C-alpha cells in the first residue's frame, strides 16, 4: 500500500508561512532545490488544496523560458507530469495533469492507496495536511528545517489533541544550515 507523506520547508519554530503571509523567509538554495526535485520524483500523486494548487500553477509554463537554469526546468518537468488531485470548494476546473477531488479527503486517500501505482501519495498545503493529520492519514512527515525563527504564521504541524509517535528514518544537513528530517508514524 502506498504511503502518504507531508513534506514542507519549515522555520525552526515550526511555521511554513511567516506572519507576512509568504515564504519569503526561505532563501533560494540550489542544493535544497535539487533535493526537493528528487523527493518529488518519488511521488506518484500529489493531493493539494486550492491555495497551493494556485501557487504551483507557475510550474506549468515556466519551463518554456529558455533563460532559466537547468534545475528549474527539471523541477518544472517533474511537477508538470505529476498527477494531482485538488481539493477546493471554489474552483470549478483545474489545469494541467490535475483533477478536482470528488469525495471527502479520507475517501480520496483510501482510493488512491488502493490504486496500483508507484510512488508515494504526497499531501500539500497546510490546511489540507492538518485535516489529513487529524484523520490519521499521514504516514511520514518530512521537514526541511530552516535556521530562522518567524514568531508566527501558518504552522507545519496542526494543533491536535491526539499524540502521534514518530520514528526517525533519515536526516540530512545541507551546507546552508537547512536540516532535513524524515519521520515515520509508528503504530
Image (tube, rainbow, N blue to C red):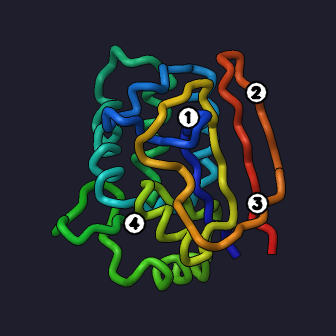
The residue nearer to you, when weighing 25 against 149, is 149
Q: Is mark 2 on a helix, strand or loop?
A: strand
Ranked by sequence position, the earlier of labels 1 and 3 is 1
Residues at discs 4 and 3 in contact (Cβ within 8 Å): no
Q: How many labels does the image show?
A: 4
Q: Residues within 10 Å of mark 3 (few under 14, many from 20)?
A: some
The residue tagged 4 is 85
Q: How crowded is mark 1: few (under 14 residues within 10 Å), some or many (20 or more)?
A: many
The residue tagged 3 is 184
Q: Residue 173 carries which label?
A: 2
How far is the residue under mark 2 from the one under mark 4? 31 Å
Q: Of circles 4 and 3, which is in front?
A: 3
Q: Is mark 1 on a helix, strand or loop?
A: strand
Residues at discs 3 and 2 in contact (Cβ within 8 Å): no
Tell me where residue 185 appears, x and y as whole percent: 75, 65
Tell me where residue 14 appears, x and y as whole percent: 57, 42
User: Which quadrant would residue 84 be assigned to in this image?
Assistant: bottom left
Ranked by sequence position, the earlier of labels 3 and 2 is 2
Amino acid at each position: 500500500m502506498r504511503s502518504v507523506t507531508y513534506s514542507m520547508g519549515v522555520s525552526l519554530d515550526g511555521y511554513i508561512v511567516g506572519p507576512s503571509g509568504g515564504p519569503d523567509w526561505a532563501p533560494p538554495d540550489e542544493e535544497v532545490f535539487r533535493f526537493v526535485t528528487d523527493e518529488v520524483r518519488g511521488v506518484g500523486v500529489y493531493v493539494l488544496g486550492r491555495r497551493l494548487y494556485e501557487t504551483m500553477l507557475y510550474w506549468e509554463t515556466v519551463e518554456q523560458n529558455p533563460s532559466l537554469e537547468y534545475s528549474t526546468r527539471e523541477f518544472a518537468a517533474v511537477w508538470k507530469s505529476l498527477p494531482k488531485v485538488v481539493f477546493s470548494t471554489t474552483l470549478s476546473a483545474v489545469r494541467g495533469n490535475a483533477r478536482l477531488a470528488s469525495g471527502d479527503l479520507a475517501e480520496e486517500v483510501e482510493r488512491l492507496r488502493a490504486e496500483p501505482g508507484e510512488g508515494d501519495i504526497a499531501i500539500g498545503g497546510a490546511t489540507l495536511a492538518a485535516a489529513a493529520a487529524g484523520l490519521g492519514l499521514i504516514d511520514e512527515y518530512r521537514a526541511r528545517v530552516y535556521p530562522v525563527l518567524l514568531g508566527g504564521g501558518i504552522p507545519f504541524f496542526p494543533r491536535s489533541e491526539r499524540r502521534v509517535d514518530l520514528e526517525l528514518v533519515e536526516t540530512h544537513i545541507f551546507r546552508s544550515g537547512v536540516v532535513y528530517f524524515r519521520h515515520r508514524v509508528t503504530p
